[in-house]
Amino acid sequence: VPLLVLMLVGALLKPLSTQVWEKVRAAQPELSLLDLKDGLGQGMLLGVFGGFRSLIADFVWISGNGDWEKRDRAKTETMIHLALTLDPTNSFFWRNGARILAYDIPVWRLRDEMKLNPDDRENPMVKQVRLEQCARAFELLDKTITREPNNPWPYTEKAQIYNLVLKDTENAAIWFGKASALPRAPYFAGRIRAELLVKMGKVREAYDCLLHFYNDLPTNDPYAARDFVYDRLRELEDELKLPQSERMQGERPAPLVFTDDHPPRAPQGSDSCGHDHAH
C-alpha cells in the first residue's frame, strides 16, 4: 500500500513540478516559496492539507536528492523550503537543510559559479558568499529554536557552523555554551566549548567551565567520558601553574566498560566538530 501511494503521489507531482519549473525558473535563479506556491495552484494545496503532508514532504526531499547530487542550487534550495513548508515538524529537514545551505552551497557558488577557491579565506568575495549562506542556515535554525527552545541540537548546529564555516571561534564558543546548558545536551558541546576558550587564550575561563561541566557529568554513563575530562583538567592546571590548593580534588575516575545497556557507537559529532579526540 505505501508503494502504491508513493507511485500515485509521484504521478500527480510530475506534471505539477514541470509547470512550476517552467514558470519560476524563467523568472529568477533564486527560488522563493511564494513563487513556488503560486506555481502549484489550489489543487496541490488542497492535497497538502488533505492529510498527506508528511508523505509528500518525504517524497519532495527524496526527489530533490538528485538535484543536490547535481549541485543544482536553485532546485536544492526550493526542495529544502518546500519540504519544510509541507512538514515543519520533521527535524531531519531542518538539520540537513541548514547543513546544505551552510556547507555545500557556498562551495557550489564559489567553485562552480564564480570559479573561486572556496578555501581562500582572504578573498572578500569568498567571505561574503559564506556569510550569505550561513545567514540562510541560521534563519532555519532560529525558527527551530523559537519552536523548541530547550532542544539542544539547533544550538550545536549553529555553533558548528560558526566554528567550521565562518571560523568564528568566539560565537562558536557562545553557542556551544548555550547548548551545553540545556537538558539532554550532547556531551561534546561542553568539551568543545572549553577547547575554543583555550584557543582564544582564555585558559582560566576554560578550566572553570570544564570543571563545572565535569562536576555535572553522570558517573554511570560511558559516553560522558569523565576520565577524559579529568585528564584534560589536569593538563589545564599544569598550563595555568595552579598551586595544589587550587587544583581539582579527587582521583581519576576509572573508564567505564560498555555494556548491553551502553553498546559502543561512533562518538557524536566526531566527524564535524573539528577535533580529533572522541566526544
Image (tube, rainbow, N blue to C red):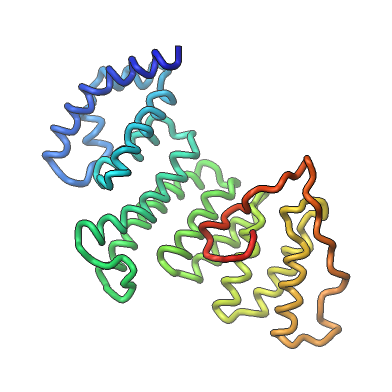
**Is residue 69 positioned above or below 276 on the image?**
above
Quarter that holds the C terminus: bottom right
Q: Which residue ends up furthest to the left in the rendered image?
A: 26
Image location of residue 28, percent across then percent down: 15, 44
The residue located at (27%, 18%) in the rendering is: 12
The residue located at (82%, 51%) in the rendering is: 220
Q: Decide if residue 235 is on the left or right side of residue 194.
A: right
**Is residue 34 positioned above or below 135 on the image?**
above
Q: Decide if residue 178 is on the left or right side of residue 13.
A: right
Q: Nearer the viewer, residue 127 or 220?
A: 220
Q: Decide if residue 60 is on the left or right side of residue 21.
A: right
| Count of residue discs | 0
Image location of residue 57, percent across then percent down: 39, 29
The residue located at (60%, 62%) in the rendering is: 177
**Is residue 169 positioned above or below 216 on the image?**
below
Quarter that holds the N terminus: top left
The residue located at (32%, 18%) in the rendering is: 46
Residue 188, by quadrant, is bottom right
Image location of residue 21, percent across then percent down: 18, 33
Image location of residue 167, percent across then percent down: 44, 69
**Is residue 44 positioned above or below 74 on the image?**
above
Residue 78, by quadrant, is top left
